[in-house]
Every structure is written in structure tokens, then in C-alpha cells.
Image: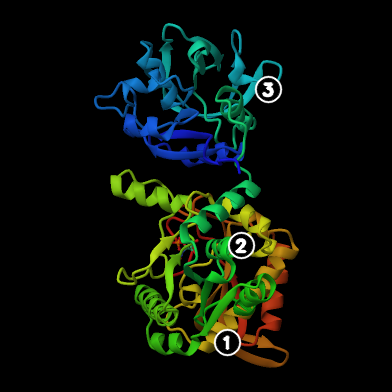
Amino acid sequence: MADLHSEKILILDFGSQYTQLIARRVREAHVYCELHPYDMDLEAIRAFQPNGIILSGGPKSVYDEGAPAVEEALFELGVPVLGICYGMQLLNRHFGGHVVPAGKREYGHADLLSQGQPGPLFDGFFVDGKSPVWMSHGDHVEQVADGFDIIAATDNAPVCGIQNVERNLYGVQFHPEVNHTPRGEVLIDTFVRKICGCSGQWTPGQIIEDAVARIREQVGTDKVILGLSGGVDSSVAAALIHRAIGDQLTCVFVDNGLLRLNEGDQVMSTFAQNLGVKVIRVDAEDRFLTALAGETDPEKKRKIIGGLFVDIFEEESNKLTDAKWLAQGTIYPDVIESAGAKTGKAHNIKSHHNVGGLPDYMKLQLLEPLRELFKDEVRTVGEELGLPHQMVWRHPFPGPGLGVRILGEIKKEYADILRQADAIYIEELYRSGHYEKISQAFAVFLPVKSVGVMGDGRTYEYVVALRAVETKDFMTAGWYPMPYADLARISSRIINEVKGINRVTYDISSKPPATIEWE
Ligand code: XMP
């Protein structure tokens, strides 16, 4: 089997909000990469044996006192380097060029113009000597370092691309990693394949083959347990581990009574019936509802749900006395995020309150087969493993489930009403083609009654609010501009079909200042 990690790109992070996108573009070119802080030790870099290094953008100026820099010897490793924005300025300054504040900050679209001999980096990038790009910078290169050629410019900035082909050093002022640079992925693909010489082995099929071999090697004949939630990450982890070790895996699925309509049955039919995975389903609705009775505070509800999940998971896993491994669906952004939190260089990505976390005294070793994968990769791997498309592309669902979508006290009656309304809403979003354009959509139960009229009678029933947001990172979000005709159909279906609801509202708050969930 080919060693999937024999080709790799190192991305050094100078704090740009786009750094993770660089990594995703490299992966899309089917090459493995890792993202590390800019001050990664040179020995560690050597040991990593990158085929190429990408220096990210960053918020600082290279001429500032104490500005982030790489170890000088990095450029002597003989490894191709691509500097993006701050990374290009660093490269230029390192070799004796000048970087100065630009007269005018440049932010947004620009037309990149080819200059001189374009060289290998821009293969296929320009059409008629031009290419639209996304800029975001306050400094620019005033004088190019000796040995470097200028290969691109804009009307505002005379130096937007530099190269030293002999030494394989390249820099671009714009951001090829963002979607606003339409041919950006061509440039990144050219860098990793043509300049760094990677052949592109990182494909879903190979990822699975590699993960299966590694899981087998790690666990041998040991038994593994996994908490299956029905969410994308734990589902894909379960399918992958099952592919590797079959019956040595036992999943524990805790139905807390706060799941979406038919979710428990769907999880069981996908895993137990279709894939033949051993799944213990724990029907714990009553325990959760009893523990939550009378509680109205959102954070206390979260704690109760998280705590009880751990208790139940522990009870079940204690029954599996021979398990040695605990499998978790940790993914690469979680790894980067906790590394960032440790070094104080936290990244601007979703950091969220996952339910639980297991106590240390459960002396199990951790098995995390998705640790190297981005969410999109987890999804394609999931599909390749035979999980249903709708399951792997489902919107995120919070650990406490409907517990934070029923405002205030949670009651079974409320959960049942909400499940029905939510199912109609989501069904309509699929049918109208909105679902895939929305990042997250759901219904919220409001425990207030309002007056309505149905037929000849007066009604006095509950309210449901509909939420749909568009977001990249879940840290900020905008409300989705749902067409009136779709809103009208969804509202009328919910009011007609769900007993207990006589009023539907649409949430038009963005985050911030609102949050995505209502609690
Ligand atoms: P907010 O409401 O903070 O949500 O804007 C951002 C994202 O996080 C999810 N979320 C949670 N996920 N446990 C989770 O696992 C939670 O307690 C929780 N609260 C919010 C939310 O659904 C959205 O995707």
C-alpha cells in the first residue's frame, strides 16, 4: 500500500483568518498537509519532511518590532516555499527587499495583471494576461529582493507576485485560497503538484484504506466502544472503525428523547440493519425528562444533559468489561483549535460546548481515526463508506439537541410538537432546494400561547419560530433570505398539520448580536 503521508505540505500560520482555507485547498489537490504555528521548531520542520512549505497571511506588518518571523534557515532547506500576503512580504524582506505601508489599503476584488515571464506558478492562471483575485492588505512590496522577478501586479500595487525559480521560492500578495479568487485552486494545485512534485494520493479511497490499516495496527484484537450520536463525525468514525475491525466495535447510542423526528430509528436502521454494526440503543427519554423537570436555565439544562449522557454511557461501557479503546469522532479543526488554545494563538473557528467528554478514570485508550480530516473530507469518506447522503450532509445539530430549542422548561409534549414542526420545515427545505444552500436550519418551540382562529372557533396555542442561517464558521452568521412563497407554504403546513401550533414566525436576526440557537 502507498504511504499516504509520504507526500506532504507544511503550512505555517501567521494568524490570517484564511489559513484553514489554504489547508483545505491543498487537501482538495489531493495532498496531505498540516497546519502549524509560524514559530515551529526547525528540527520539527526537518523531521516532518515537507515537500513544500506555505507561509500564510497574517494581521501584523513585517517591519513591526517583534513581528512574527520564521527561523532564517527555513529558506535554506531546499524545499519550495510559497508565501501568501504576509508570507510573501516576509520572504521578500528576508532576501533584502523592502516592504512599506501602502498609500491606500487594498481590500476586495482586483484584476491581477501578468508581468514579465510568468514562470511555473501561474500556469493556467491568467486568461489574456489577467485574472480576478481577492486582496486584503495594508502593506506592499516597494522594492523586490535581489534574485527575485516580479510576475504580477495590479493597478494599485506594482508587486503582487514574485519568484526566484532557481531556488523555488514564490510569493503572491493576493489570497488564492479564498473563493473570491476564482482560479485560486489552480494556483495551489500547481504549487503542490508541479513545483513541489506531489502526485496527489490523498483521495477518499486511499484515506479509507490507510485509516483501516492504521486502526487494525493500533487496536489489534482489542475491543472498542464508541458513543454514536447520529451526527456526522461519530457516524463516519463508526463506519470506518467497523470497516476495519467489524465486531470488535460496539457502539452505544443514547436516545435522550431530545432528538429529531425518527432520528433514533434512522440511526438504528443505518448502522445496525444496513451496515451490521453492533449498536446498543439506550432508551433514556424518561431519565432525561425527569432530570430536566422544572429547569429553565439554558446552561443548567446543558449541564444536566451532558452529565447524564456521561453517566449513561459509563453504565453501558462498564458492562463491556473487555473494551480497551474509546473511539471518538475528533476532526482536524478540533485538533487545531485545541493546539491554538494551548499556545494562546486561538483560531477564529467554532469553539463549542460538546456534550460531556468522558472522565479520565475510564482507563481507555483513545482511538480518533478522523483526527487528520476536515469536515468536508469526513463527509466524502462517509459517503464512500456507504452512509446515506442525507446523513453525512446534514446540518449540525447541537449535543443537547432539542433541549436548547425548547425555550425554558422541557416537557415531552413540547418536544413532540417541535419534532413535527421541524420535520415539516426541513422536508420543505429539501423539496425547494434551499437545504443545501443553508448552513443550519431548525424550528424553535416558544412556550407562549397566542390567540388564533380556526374554522368558527377560537384557538389558544403555542408558537414556533423558524431559523435558517448562512455562515462559514458559525462564529458569525446571517439569516437566510427565504422567499415569501416558501415561507408561506411552510407556515401553512405547520399550522395545519401540527396540533398545538397556531402561529409561525421567521427569525431575522444575525449573529452577532443574536446567537444561532435560541438558548
Ligand atoms: P450559537 O448558538 O452559539 O451556535 O451561535 C453556534 C453553533 O454551535 C452549535 N451549538 C452547540 N453545539 N452543544 C453543541 O454540540 C451545544 O451546547 C451547542 N450550542 C450551540 C449550534 O447549533 C451552532 O451550530
**Residue nearest the observer in this picture, 279 or 482:** 279
Read off the residue under disc 3. 124
Q: In the rendered structure, are the residues bearing label 3 and label 2 in contact, judged by CB atoms less than 8 Å apart?
A: no
- Frontmost of labels 1 and 3 is 3
The disc at residue 461 is 1
- Amino acid on which disc 3 is placed: Gly
Helix, strand, or loop for circle 1? strand
- Amino acid on which disc 1 is placed: Glu
Left or right of 62, for residue 3? right
Q: Position of residue 207 (x, y in %)?
A: 59, 48
**Which residue is the extreme one toward the front?**
221
Where is 442 relative to 339, above or below?
below
Residue sitting at x 57%, y 22%: 195
The disc at residue 243 is 2
The verdict on label 3 being within 8 Å of ligand 1 is no
**Residue nearest the observer in this picture, 343 or 272:** 272
**Residue nearest the observer in this picture, 337 or 127:** 337
Q: How far is the residue under mark 1 from the one under mark 2?
A: 49 Å
Q: Position of residue 454 (x, y in %)?
A: 69, 88
Q: Position of residue 295 (x, y in %)?
A: 37, 84
Quadrant, the N terminus: top right
**Residue nearest the observer in this picture, 219 or 231:** 219
- Frontmost of labels 3 and 2 is 2
